[in-house]
Image (spheres, helix red, strand yellow):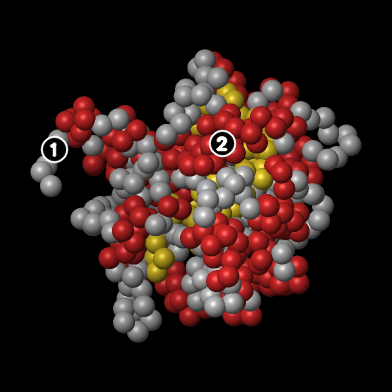
Amino acid sequence: MGSISSEQQKQLLSKIATNQGHGENSPYFDGWKAYDNNPYHPIRNPKGVIQMGLAENQLCFDLIEDWIRRNPQASICTTEGVKEFKDIAIYQDYHGLPAFRQAVANFMGKVRGGRATFDPNRIVMGGGSTGANELLTFCLADPGDAFLVPSPYYPAFDRDLSWRTGVQLLPVVCESSNDFKITKAALELAYEKAQEAHINVKGLMVTNPSNPLGTILDRETLQTIVSFINEKNIHLISDEIYAATVFSQPKFISVAEIIEEEDVVCNRDLIHIVYSLSKDMGFPGFRVGIVYSYNDAVVNCGRKMSSFGLVSTQTQHLISSMLADDEFIENFIAESANRLATRYKIITRELSKVGIGCLKSNAGLFCWMDLRKLLKEATVEEEMVLWHMIIKDVKLNVSPGSSFHCTEPGWFRVCFANMDNETMEEALERIQSFVRQSEEAPVPAARSKRFKGNLQLSSKSRRMEEAIMSPCIMSPHSPLVSART
Ligand SMILES: Cc1ncc(COP(=O)(O)O)c(C=O)c1O
């Protein structure tokens, strides 16, 4: 391939193809590259990097594999299921197989403890939540419009909601002083700022349970949110893809429940839920994403758009059978929650032994670790220094708070459901000894050598969509941004 300058590329290609909105070139990818180049293996590479930056739920694959062995007819690629191969492999209605939509609607109700019901005719498919979120954005907003998003938030929203749609994300700043709760004051402030800047706010995007916090929205906060969007006449997107990862009390409350309440006044045309099986079932590779909208026009338009990101019928067929097995699903949801609760208990207990706390949470595949006391100064620059040390010296790929737009330096997201018990133990020992050493010989401010970014991104890293971070989120003072521009 001949080499072409980026200026020439800009002339040859579209703005989307040549802008940085996808975030793959972000410095945050260094952590992924470090893991990719030197992955931990207990025997072959015991000093390698442990991946704690990936929100994957791998704790219940034994249950899934067992179900698949007991139900070979559920797949069209087995002797028992092949007689349905032709009917499934040919073109299908892009609304989705009726059995699939029914099974997903039932599953969504079950995951919410039966406290909300879902109409299969409102289920629209997208390629994972990634595709579902973008599809919804295309339906709700025009380039230049904005969504408010409480921070800290999932970094790839910058890609999913903005990159191809041209929609802006404006943070609603939440702080540790009240456990990062979303308050009416914070919502109003973000809205006012947008108005002052003459930005047209079209919606509010919440993630419940939260990535990266692992917390759930309580009833009062949900009511505040619903009344806020109703008053401003803007949309509410509730990304509920971690709904079944709630592993201890209090129970998860979906916005679907809130709008059913008698005393809640709400224009349902403004309410949309995004769902997927990536986290609750642990199937991110299947790309099962769902938009559930209470707005008929959004359902209709979404259906047309979903042609660009359908779930393959082979997957729909398998998933319909699996989700329709009530006994299996109920057991799976309960067991998955138990296993997540155990992991959370172990990680928070072991971190507390070295005086490291985590935000109290009861959901998700991660905890929100507070390393503020290890920072010499409360700056993004110092957070980067500490993060690079954790990757380079401790050899753990955790995710720094600034990548989630957290405004308080020193928080890190640590994923705990993508590894086996032994790897988890090794990771915890490494963190413990790092904290002990840091306390004996504190890290001087911003003195650590910058992490050398001489790393090639392999195709294996590219699957790690979850970690993609946009450089535009970086603080203007970030050493990494200035070092590379
Ligand atoms: C809050 C949130 N939304 C959406 C996604 C994307 O999920 P999917 O794999 O279904 O596209 C993620 C993935 O981590 C997430 O955390």
Indicate left or right for 100 with 378 as reference: right
Q: Return the residue at label 2.
A: 304
The reply to whether dot 2 and dot 1 touch (C-beta < 8 Å) is no
Q: Which residue is mark 1?
A: 4
Q: Nearer the viewer, residue 14 or 102?
A: 102
- Tell me which numbered mark, 2 or 1, is placed earlier along the sequence: 1
Camera-side residue: 62 or 354? 62
| Residue at 72 percent of width and 64 percent of height | 324
Quadrant (top left, top right, bottom left, bottom right) of the C terminus: top left
Which residue type carries mark 1?
Ile
Q: Name the outermost residue toward the bottom.
A: 43
Up-down relation of residue 78 to residue 476 (above or below):
below
Task: Compare residues 427 and 364 and report the one nearer the observer.
Answer: 364
Q: Nearer the viewer, residue 41 or 238?
A: 238
Residue 477 visible in rendering: no
| SS state under label 2 | helix
Task: Please state the horizontal and vertical placement of residue 194, each as a whole percent of the image.
Answer: 54, 21
Rate crowding at label 1 as few (under 14), some (14 to 19) or many (20 or more) other CA atoms within 10 Å: few
Residue at disc 1, secondary structure: loop
In the shown orientation, is residue 148 left or right of residue 112?
A: left
Q: Is residue 458 visible?
A: yes
Q: Residue 111 appears at what percent x and percent y?
A: 72, 58
Q: How far is mark 2 from mark 1, CA to CA?
A: 37 Å
Residue 361 on image: x %, y %: 65, 57
Residue 358 picture location, percent across and down: 58, 59
Q: Residues within 10 Å of mark 2 (few under 14, many from 20)?
A: some
**Residue depicted at x 37% and y 37%:** 21
Tell us which disc is closer to us: 2 or 1: 2
- Residue 390 shown left or right of residue 424 in the figure: left
Q: Residue shown at 48%/55% (left/top)?
A: 412
The amino acid type of the residue labelled 2 equals: Lys
Residue drawn at (25%, 32%), measured in percent from left and top?
13
